[in-house]
Image (cartoon, rainbow, N blue to C red):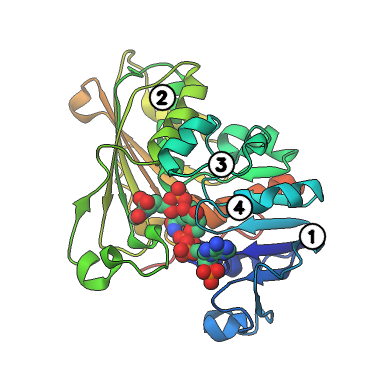
Amino acid sequence: MIKVGIVGGTGYTGVELLRILAQHPKVKLKVITSRQEAGMAVDELFPSLRKKITLKFSDPSKADLNKCDLVFFATPNGVAMQQARSLFDAGVKIIDLSADFRIKDVAEWEKWYGMSHACPELVAEAIYGLPEVNRASIKNAKLIANPGCYPTAVQLGFLPLIEAKIVDMNQLIADTKSGVSGAGRKAEVHTLFPEAADNFKSYAVPGHRHLPEIKQGLSNIARKQIGLTFVPHLTPMIRGIHATLYATLTKQIDLQTLYADRYANEPFVDVLPAGSHPETRSVRGSNFCRIAVHRPQGGNIAVILSVTDNLVKGAAGQAVQNMNIMFGLPETLGIEHVPLLP
Ligand SMILES: NC(=O)C1=CN([C@@H]2O[C@H](COP(=O)(O)OP(=O)(O)OC[C@H]3O[C@@H](n4cnc5c(N)ncnc54)[C@H](OP(=O)(O)O)[C@@H]3O)[C@@H](O)[C@H]2O)C=CC1
Ligand SMILES: CC(=O)N[C@@H](CCC(=O)OP(=O)(O)O)C(=O)O
């Protein structure tokens, strides 16, 4: 059994990890932390976990994480980088759901995240945990930078076009929408029910911190700098990412076949039949990314629709997928949930 610790077990990605790992046949949960709820039984705060998790939340400053084989950080940006060095040196594997190790250019990370990096020397050691791109490196990784929610949906959507080099890579457009759980469980005015329900808005149009992450990933695949316009929106749903992606074709090939072939062996990427319009509820609670490919009126603009659950393929599910790969388990073990309807 893999002995697992979770730092930040009361946030939305943390409790999603608990939901998944409570039923994972190869995991033994050892430590779950929360500063605010230290001492409280996990199932008292989350009755959905009654009879599944019997641990209490520990104070992270007192928790013995070194007894774990693997620690997940489901904490705000800037926390994992403070603790990663000592765990890494103790041989404890780390999967960080935050952004602390995602951007290879530390100065760029510091610019977008507005803080100094506490552990810049470990950034080079981190493997970006997008299995559909980096599976071979993830197998031997000690530190995984788990991708962001928008970056997962956007990169999986654009990937086949970039690999095939059949689009203008200077003018990619990602028009993305997120459910409100993407902002986390902490209290903030813009996520209050009267603010977020019955409303729809864009935000961070001049620049969102996921822009450098997506550009880094797609530029690595293109082997040159790509140009991307990234516009996020907040929608009045709880879970879900819907990315509408636009690219100008420079070659005419059968896009449906391109996507079907690229993802034929990927357990969690589902290319829908031609003409489909994927809905966020078709992936709700599951680790799937569903993609549909369009070329409206037969023109030279490819329109790719990519949907995920931000808390699953966009965070906790992908983190467990990475854990499975790191520990030599079947990649789909414990994350084959069928989406929730309605
Ligand atoms: N929500 C989403 O859709 C996604 C989120 N992410 C990323 O995952 C991470 C977690 O997100 P999310 O679950 O939404 O966040 P939440 O705000 O919902 O939860 C944060 C958790 O971290 C704990 N925490 C906060 N500060 C500290 C600290 N200084 N030391 C230790 N623990 C701390 C909190 O508990 P307590 O305060 O009691 O300690 C809480 O359990 C973030 O980095 C986020 O950017 C990534 C992909 C998607
Ligand atoms: C709706 C919403 O607010 N979404 C968050 C992004 C989700 C997130 O937590 O960011 P990471 O994936 O980098 O960890 C935002 O735009 O800031």
Counting residues from the start of the chain, the first of labels 3 and 4 encountered is: 4
Circle 4 Cα neighbour tier, 10 Å, few/some/many (<14 / 14–19 / ≥20): many
Counting residues from the start of the chain, the first of labels 1 and 4 encountered is: 1
Tell us which disc is closer to us: 3 or 4.
Answer: 3
- 236 vs 140, left or right, is left
Nearer to the camera, 30 or 35 = 35
Labels 2 & 4 near each other (Cβ < 8 A): no
Counting residues from the start of the chain, the first of labels 2 and 3 encountered is: 3
Picture quarter with the N terminus: bottom right
**Residue tagged 4:** 80
> Residue 334, percent across and down?
64, 60
- 208 vs 299, left or right, is right
Give residue 161's mark: 2
**Residue tagged 1:** 66
> Residue 118, percent across and down?
60, 44
- Cα distance in 3D space between marks 2 and 3: 34 Å
> Residue 235, percent across and down?
26, 57
